[in-house]
Image: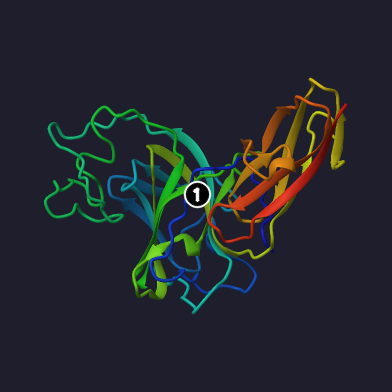
Amino acid sequence: MLLALTATQSHAQFTPAQPAVSAIAAPEKPATGELILYDGSLARSRFVAQAGSWGGGAASEVTEIKFKGPGSLKVDIRGPYEGGRVDFQKGPGLPKSDEGAYLVLYTMLTDQQQTTATGIPGADIPTKAMPLGGMAPPGAMESTEPGGTPGGAFQPGEKKEELEHLRLAIFFDQGMGLVERYPIIVYDETPEGWSTVAIPFAAFTHAPVIDGKLRRIAICGDARQTIHIGRISIVRDTTPMQGEIRRPSTRDERHDTEIKLGQDVDLKLFPEVGMAAIETTWDFDDKDGIGVDAEGLEVVYRYKKRGTYTVTATVADIANQKQTISVQYTVTVK
């Protein structure tokens, strides 16, 4: 059964990485449904899983915070090259193709790392990009921690920021895939605070040859923060996106409304997008063409003239895996 998750926040500036050769096919799994790689217990994983550090970060299993299973993975992220990893001794194999496949992390963001990056006095961060978990390129100062930038992931004195993007790598018997910056979109949370990050396999760039079984997932990010991962799974989702516009203040489900001149109209998009992470833009008058007057799932607007207006919300999948849709709503200003 596919998970039907509704986004409560959109991200308008993310441009997904394009595959270097072709999209990575997801490891073998049922044609529909969910293949669970980790569900709160490393010892019980059918794929014989282990957790460990990546660079200067850390990952370990704890029992005080849990999703559906007996525990969760606590991953201390220190930056883009430092976090945690999960290894699979008997990972699932790689089929030839798999449309609509997502790597899904069930996550809970907890406290941010309180330690200020110290760095190494007089040392500069390398300007050349380093592979996730790799050493510095030739000519750059080597890190004292494998996979890290000199002195850690941040420059001396840099203030910590809230974690907004994950940086992930997936390793197979032959070859690996990498997604540099995938946004953490806030989905409907459980009462305990769990939400999901669903990354399409097509968003991973990769080497010309990918083959064999899935052996490792490395998880880093763009800020110092601790996250808990209660489940890691592969989900297939090819359902089209849909949605409707309502007025939150009136709580009705009509597709039109009537207001007085000078009165604000509040509108909210209620999307059903499956695993897709979305961006939403609004146009408040289609007479001059469909443009961008506002962004986000909730908007407030005031018309300057009387008349009947067609409001259009355009919903786009930021990873370009699902077709963009338009949802319309009619506003009459008296």
Label 1 element class: strand
- Looking at the picture, which amino acid does disc 1 mark? Ile
x and y, in percent, of residue 210 in the image: 38, 74
Residue 118 spot, x, y in % from top left: 23, 31
Q: Is residue 105 left or right of residue 190?
A: left
Q: Residue furthest front?
A: 288
Count of marks, rendered view: 1
Tell me the residue at 59%/44% (across/down). Answer: 194
Residue 190 in view of the camera: no
Asked if 312 appears above or below 97 in the picture, the reply is above
Residue 303 position, x and y percent, is 75, 27
In which quadrant of the rendered image does the C terminus lie?
top right
Q: Residue at x 34, y 69 (%)?
A: 207
Left or right: residue 58 versus residue 95 is: left
**Residue that mark 1 sits on:** 229
The answer to whether residue 54 is seen in the rendering is yes
Residue 227 is situated, as x and y percent measured from the top left of the image, at: 46, 42
Which residue corresponds to the image point at 46% horizontal and 40% vertical from the top-left?
164
In this view, 114 is above or below 41: above
- Quadrant housing residue 187: top right
Q: 10 Å neighbourhood of mark 1: few (<14), some, or many (≥20)?
A: many
Taking 247 as reference, is 302 above or below it?
above
Report the quarter where the N terminus lies. Answer: bottom right
Please state which of residues 237 and 62 is positioned toward the viewer in this rendering. 237
Q: Nearer the viewer, residue 90 or 290?
A: 290
